[in-house]
Amino acid sequence: MEYILMNKETQVLEFLYDSEIHTVLKIEQIFNPEYAPLGIIDNGHISRKLLNEWWKDRAIPASRSKFKEILSNMNITSSVELLELCYGLSLSDQYWIKEKNLNISWKDINFFENGFSEDMGKLLMGEIPYSNHLNLFSPDNSSDGNLQKKWKIINKDRYLIKGGNDLNNQEPFNEVIATKLYERILNKEDFVPYTIIKENNNYYSCCKNMINTDEELITAFYIDRIKKLHGSDSLYEHYVNICEELKIPKARASIDKMIVCDYILSNYDRHYRNFGVIRNIKTLQFKCIAPLFDSGSSLYANTPTIHIGENYSAKPFKTKPKEQLRLVKNLAWFNPDKLVGFTTDIKEILSQNPLLDENRISMICNEVTKHIKDVIDLKNELENN
């Protein structure tokens, strides 16, 4: 079949697609390469190989909790089939595909302005069983990450509802703790705020979509690949330099804030796909570093209580947390006075989780206190040298 890759209403390229093996066979014509996803560009040229990788990356990962069982029940082998059902549409950008001769526009089908079925989200969250009568036209077909999640329309706005691990469901509560931290030491535009909601006797985190219809979220995974990393280069400097070359305002300061906050929260999963930048799809200008989001994998959420405080592997620039913290060379923005009472916030939030006991909560608070002291010590060191 012949398809056209679209960026909102702009034609990017035409390609030949095999729907049986879910693969782009050939790029037949390029219309507006400047509007192409960054992820499909190699040395200034659009790559069929990268187009296939980018396309499959849009689909739900096979590692999603309980997702393989869902695929089996649906009698399909690849989550890309689900992506095809919704034109590849997402709530993270404006890209989509349409059949070459199909008379349809972005305004007719996009999830930002049109309603969508909640069936797929409920199925992914284990709220309903699969049946042939479900309406699967949903942005949930293009959601990433390993934890259960779904999109929901609340008062006309799009919200992401996300669960936690099966052991203690701590991640949703961690998102709210992260929000409390960010509210204390960051600016409002620096982060996405999260709340807790309860559905069917389960607790989930809830956040409003961070982008509008003229924007796209580009993850660090694709930003970092703009330039090749040389063996001796620092991962941190490599990424910051690219952001500065793209003329992203306050890039280094924003990334440093992420590092500091992740250190305080003992974030063990700040991988290259859950931070990034926001670009305007009309002007193609890079607007800003994306506000901090997806901080639930922190505060030892997946660690047995007895092992809280032991070394964990940090991301994305260094594996040792203290070494990553020391990448930050300017802490003038950090005001430790604003963190007085923060552990009280942590106790109040985690105490709402019926799966956590007082001992675990106390140990988590102790680790946060230690990490705040480490940041204060670094701030004093930097200012006295």
Image (cartoon, grey):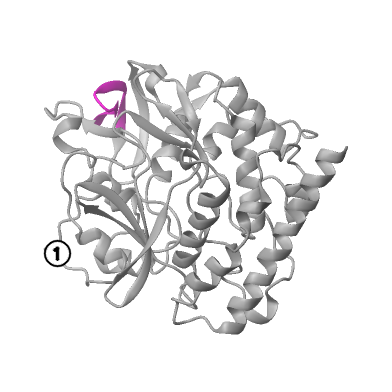
Q: Position of residue 51 (x, y in %)?
A: 42, 33
Against 70, residue 159 (above or below) is: above
Q: Is residue 232 left or right of residue 141?
A: right
The reply to whether residue 70 is in sight is yes
Q: Is residue 333 left or right of residue 133?
A: right
Q: Residue furthest top?
A: 31
Q: Is residue 71 above or below residue 193?
A: below
Q: Is residue 236 magenta?
A: no
Residue placed at 36% from the left, 34% from the top? 24
Q: Helix or strand or loop: what does disc 1 sit on? A: loop
Range covered by the magenta-colored residues: 1-16
| Residue 341 pos. (x, y %) | 59, 64
Question: Would you say the magenta stretch is mainly helix, strand or loop?
Answer: strand
Residue 75 seen from this side: no
Are there few (<14), some (14-19), or many (20+) residues within 10 Å of tag 1?
few
Residue 248: x %, y % from top left: 54, 25
Which of the pair 135/353 is nearer the observer? Answer: 353
